[in-house]
Image (cartoon, helix red, strand yellow):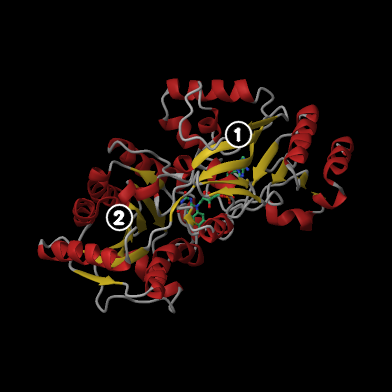
Amino acid sequence: MMDFLSQCRAVVGDAYVLDAPADMAPFLTDWRGRFTGKALAVLRPGSVEQVAALVRACAAHRVALVPQGGNTGLVLGSVPDVSGAQVVLSLARLNTIRQIDPVNRAMTVDAGCILQRIQEAAAAEGCLFPLSLAAEGSCTIGGNLSTNAGGTAVLRYGNTRELCLGLEVVTPQGEVWSGLRGLRKDNTGYDLRDLFIGAEGTLGIITGAVLKLYPQPKASITALAALPSPAHAQQLLVLMQDHCGSSLTGFELMSRFCLDLVARQFPHLPKPFAAPYAQYVLLELSSSESEAHAVGLLEHAIGAALERGVIQDAVVASSVAQSAGLWQLREHIPLAQAKAGKNIKHDISLPVSRIADFIAATGPQLEAAFPGCQLVCFGHLGDGNLHYNVAPPEGISNEDFLVNQDKVNRVVHDSVVAFGGSISAEHGIGALKRDELAHYKSPVELNMMRAIKAALDPLGIMNPGKIL
Ligand SMILES: Cc1cc2nc3c(=O)[nH]c(=O)nc-3n(C[C@H](O)[C@H](O)[C@H](O)COP(=O)(O)OP(=O)(O)OC[C@H]3O[C@@H](n4cnc5c(N)ncnc54)[C@H](O)[C@@H]3O)c2cc1C
């Protein structure tokens, strides 16, 4: 293998081929700390040409590679297996904002740009890049595109797929496909861009992207509503959409258990209500007119919801700081879970109209099979997306409970499918859910996916063992 590593060093320089265990360590364990792989080396190219040259070297030596952005993915897609034969190819050094075109409302960026930096660069030009998620300070746009990340603004702006106009990709043969077109209409055959989005690095390496920008809203107002049940949350969503139309930009469901967990792990965060309620919805309204317009819309809609008994109480943030405080409650749920211990995560999507029925049906099934298990149920209800996580009963260790992972998955995912849903809404498949995908996808779908993989990556060097 020295030949291969020497070739890599010749491409990127000695400093950017890491093969000492201590140097490689941060790239080998997933964000949740559930899995640690081994690697032959970690490669850190600094340009698109270097990425292409490294992929050519990998192809020539049949070395499999694992693309990695911020390594915040939740399905073990960005870490190598335990063979020690794969290389991690980190895109972190490709971090230039190449161009911002406020008239075309588009920006062209390197794949390794941190999401938060992209948001800030757009804002500096008076524009909005709406993708937003709790990992935005660490995740990269290449990772967001490769997982087709969702986040908190999907209701209004769509997933990352909807926010992308064009891509630049290094193919598994080490060629550069430059599809960096800032076009909103382009019907010239198969949509290659859409093939690479959500492919989790199994078809090629995204090195650059053209992203859609939007006008900055003049004001955003946040409120937290308290409700008796998820069915009430569904009613609230319809009511809010009827009253506020596309001004409704966020709609997040959180159970009491979730906010209690946040309060325990992060006691400094706000506690908006004196008394507890069964469910909470975090609402965000944005206005292109003014703050007064947003407040007026929100107060009117909340008044109607209280009057009809859809909600029991609500607090409306009266400042940007208070808004941020309410969002922090939502964003700290995954962090609070991580601090509290390990749990069995499900990132599922359902028709919005079936969410309450799914929650009502699945909880008792889990309780019957795993008495005392604790449900951390929250998510982007406006998008039909729940994070439905199952934590050990009090007094049972993580390790003792995690052995049930396959059985827990079967209960939850069977129920998801029975309610017409999907076993992965926004986190992807990676290595973690690969067997579940094989279990639930139809042979027709799996065969088409395998045919695409074999056509684009005949040597099978692109993130093998992920998705398929
Ligand atoms: C606290 C927290 C909150 C989160 N919240 C959300 C959320 O609300 N919504 C949501 O959708 N996700 C969420 N996620 C998970 C989400 O998938 C990631 O945060 C993000 O999209 C991954 O970006 P990354 O740069 O870290 O990618 P990585 O984790 O490095 O990689 C993810 C996958 O993409 C591949 N990949 C990475 N870069 C490239 C590239 N340039 N070319 C080809 N393949 C590549 C990797 O091989 C891997 O398969 C959250 C994660 C955390 C830790």
Q: Amino acid at mark 1?
A: Thr
Using residue 358 as the reference point, say whether residue 187 is left or right of it.
Answer: right
Image location of residue 352, percent across then percent down: 27, 45
**Crowding near the residue tagged with mark 1, few <14, some 14–19, many ≥20 C-alpha atoms within 10 Å:** many
| Residue 312 occupies quadrant | bottom left
Using residue 237 as the reference point, say whether residue 452 is left or right of it.
Answer: right
Image location of residue 175, percent across then percent down: 71, 29
Q: Is residue 321 above or below residue 7?
A: below
Q: Is residue 367 above or below residue 441?
A: below
Quadrant where the image shows the N terminus: top right
Q: Residue at x 42, y 47 (%)?
A: 347
Quadrant where the image shows the C terminus: top right
Q: Residue at x 39, y 64 (%)?
A: 330
Q: Which mark is residue 202?
A: 1
First along the sequence among labels 1 and 2: 1
Q: Amino acid at mark 2?
A: Leu
- Asked if residue 85 shows in the view, the reply is no
Image location of residue 70, percent across then percent down: 62, 53
* Nearer to us: label 1 or label 2: 2
Q: Is residue 281 above or below residue 79?
A: below
Q: Is mark 1 within 8 Å of ligand 1?
A: yes
Q: Which mark is residue 248?
A: 2
State how far apart marks 1 and 2 are (Cα): 35 Å
Q: Nearer the viewer, residue 57 or 76?
A: 57
Using residue 300 as the reference point, say whether residue 335 is left or right of it.
Answer: right
